[in-house]
Image: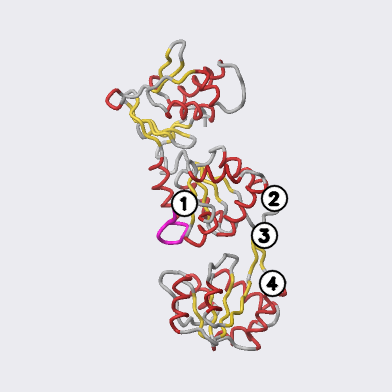
Amino acid sequence: MGDGARQPGHGPLAGFTVGVTAARRADELGALLGRRGATVLHAPALRIVPLADDGELMAATKRIVDRAPDVVVATTAIGFRGWVEAADGWGLGDALLERLRTVELLARGPKVKGAVRAAGLTERWSPASESMAEVLDRLLEQGVAGRRIAVQLHGEPLPGFVEALREGGAEVVGVPVYRWLPPEDLGPVDRLLDAAVSRGVDAVTFTSAPAAVSLLGRAEERGLLPELLAAFGHDVLPACVGPVTAVPLQAHGVDTVQPERFRLGPLVQLLCQELPARARALPVAGHRLEIRGHAVLVDGELRTVPPAGMSLLRALARRPGWVVPRAELLRALPGTGRDEHAVETAMARLRTSLGTPKLIQTVVKRGYRLALDPATDA
């Protein structure tokens, strides 16, 4: 697609770039974003290692088979299925299912309930909210002193959940079904970090707390954490699938946005509302100019703009209507050239991209300005 190419019928996220940190279901999230016009930067911030060969999970399974707990809390569908499959592999599958038929089985939400029933079991109770806090409230209301409670751990921190049960007098058996590890290839994560600190992405999505921990940790290793937090504070929108996922970011003082329903679909819908609302829209030379991450809407028509042109346009839009000197525009261009001729070349390409040359005026011997309409000049 060349300079100034028009895209008819663009989606709500056209012109925006969104980073995806998910390992699991990354393709699904990327496809949802792409269908709405976003450019997607994939950077799996961790990988999931199943524990089928792990002694910890086998030991926890044997403890449950040998001595039945009073309650088992199933927290994720993938984790519950993985546990049953691993137990099958060790020849403990039937014994585990037999045990789970005799205990009070709690399933956190509809997906987990589906996995429980697919295994031929029936949950005793499931919260409508999918909230671990609601599961905890129910257990504490019933009283947990002297009860043995098995909790399927799923790689996410469960802030205070296990501790609150222990404080209430319960014996807690952790069932670690899979483990999060850093990605084997850090290249994509580093590219996402570089893009975030240089404002080359408009939003970064998080679908698990460990992914947030991993990205923040890698930024710290590279000495980029202060810059990343500054980007999240201003220009790059951190979007989390739910409150548990947001905890590591909030611990660093980052405000995040989250959908009301903790699902990928609502997360994408939230971005479809938030990103266009954050875009700068200006009345310029009788047209409506909306500046997005790597494209511009001119009267609602999407036009792709090269990176140098976007840098110039942002510099002009910071003070719409005012003359911006060539030297200042040169500093705004990517790269470290000193030739002001580079500004003229980039400006010519920007005007071609916009398809409406009069949006940007040349002020002889001084610089350039956005032709802001007089009614809003103040």
Whether 219 is drawn above or below 113: the answer is above
The image quadrant of residue 351 is: top left
The residue type indicated by label 2 comes to Asp
Q: Residue at x 45, y 80 (%)?
A: 125
Residue 63 placed where, x, y %? 66, 84
The residue type indicated by label 4 comes to Ala
Secondary element under disc 3, as helix, strand or loop, is: strand
> Which color mode does the image show?
secondary structure
The residue type indicated by label 1 comes to Asp
The image quadrant of residue 110 is: bottom left
- Magenta span dominant secondary structure: loop
The image quadrant of residue 89 is: bottom right
Whether 344 is drawn above or below 200: the answer is above
Q: Residue at x 54, y 30 (%)?
A: 307
Query: Quarter holding the C terminus?
Result: top left
Whether 55 is drawn above or below 38: the answer is below
Q: Is residue 271 magenta?
A: no
Specify few, some or many for label 4: CA neighbours under 10 Å numbering under 14, 14-19, or 20 or more: many
Q: Which residues are magenta?
A: 256-266
Q: Is residue 260 magenta?
A: yes
Residue behind mark 3: 181
Residue behind mark 2: 185
